[in-house]
Image: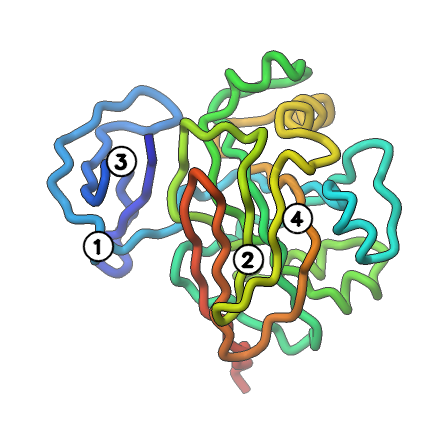
Amino acid sequence: MRIVRIQRERGSIPLWGWVTDDRVGLLEGSPFGEYRRQPAEFALPGLNLVAPLQPGKIVCVGKNYAAHAAEHGSEVPELPLLFLKPPSSVIGPGETIRLPPQSSAVEHEAELAVVIGRRGRWLTSEEAPAHILGYTIGHDVTARDLQQLDSQWTRAKGFDTFCPIGPWIETELDPSDALITCSVNGQLRQMGSTRDMVFPVHELVAYVSSIMTLEPGDLILTGTPSGVGPLLDGDEVTVEIEGIGRLQNPVRAETVAG
């Protein structure tokens, strides 16, 4: 099932929905608890889809593809390399990625994102699937110059709009071999498969749960394939994951009020 959040009017509270073909029905309740599917009475084209969830925390994995580590002259870590992005960095499909004035080297990083559905701590890899609600597309936008300058990655990864996700949560994806691509202005930049992850999805969920309690609605970004590159004012960036769909966002320079 594909789970969306739709906004019927600007500024209104988003509503949960489910997608079948090109139709959307509302969900009575929450996908993180009990719910009932209402008839698919709305046409998907023309609906305002917002970020498919507002995560409690966003746990990210660095250097989880060997080729990506190599393109930055780094070794693959012995254990998953974790960092956090703030929930305030989340935007949805079609929303604008803003290039902050503090950076002159913002780059794209296309990623598979895991949506946690059940609370868990000290999970095994075998237990992890029962705690996953589904998967969505994640985009770990990064200010590369600031990442290289700082000893920590919070500033480089944490700007508002630096975590586009969407367009929905897919509950039936097999995460073991899904193709990930990223294009900018129609030009292919990144292409890889989740089978190339150093640490696979279920191992990552188990590892993160050994450090912190995972709560329903938490998000885990699982790392990016090689081919990361610059985002410039006026660009249109598209991330696609086989079995999920497409996430598109325009890129604009941020205007700072004087």
Q: Position of residue 85 (x, y in %)?
A: 63, 49
For label 4, the SS is loop
Whether the residues at callouts 3 and 2 have beta carbons within 8 Å, the answer is no
Residue 45, numbered circle: 1
- Sequence-earlier tag: 3 or 2: 3
Characterize the local packing of mark 3: few (<14), some (14-19) or many (20 or more) Cα atoms within 10 angstroms.
many
The CA distance from mark 3 to mark 2 is: 26 Å
Identity, as a three-letter code, of the amino acid under mark 1: Pro
- Sequence-earlier tag: 1 or 3: 3
Characterize the local packing of mark 1: few (<14), some (14-19) or many (20 or more) Cα atoms within 10 angstroms.
few
Q: Position of residue 98 (x, y in %)?
A: 53, 70
Identity, as a three-letter code, of the amino acid under mark 4: Thr
Residue 224, numbered circle: 4
Report the quarter where the N terminus lies: top left
Q: Is residue 75 left or right of residue 94?
A: right
Q: Position of residue 241 (x, y in %)?
A: 49, 45
The CA distance from mark 4 to mark 3 is: 28 Å
Report the quarter where the C terminus lies: bottom right
Whether the residues at callouts 1 and 4 have beta carbons within 8 Å, the answer is no
Which residue is more in the foreground, 225 or 31? Answer: 225
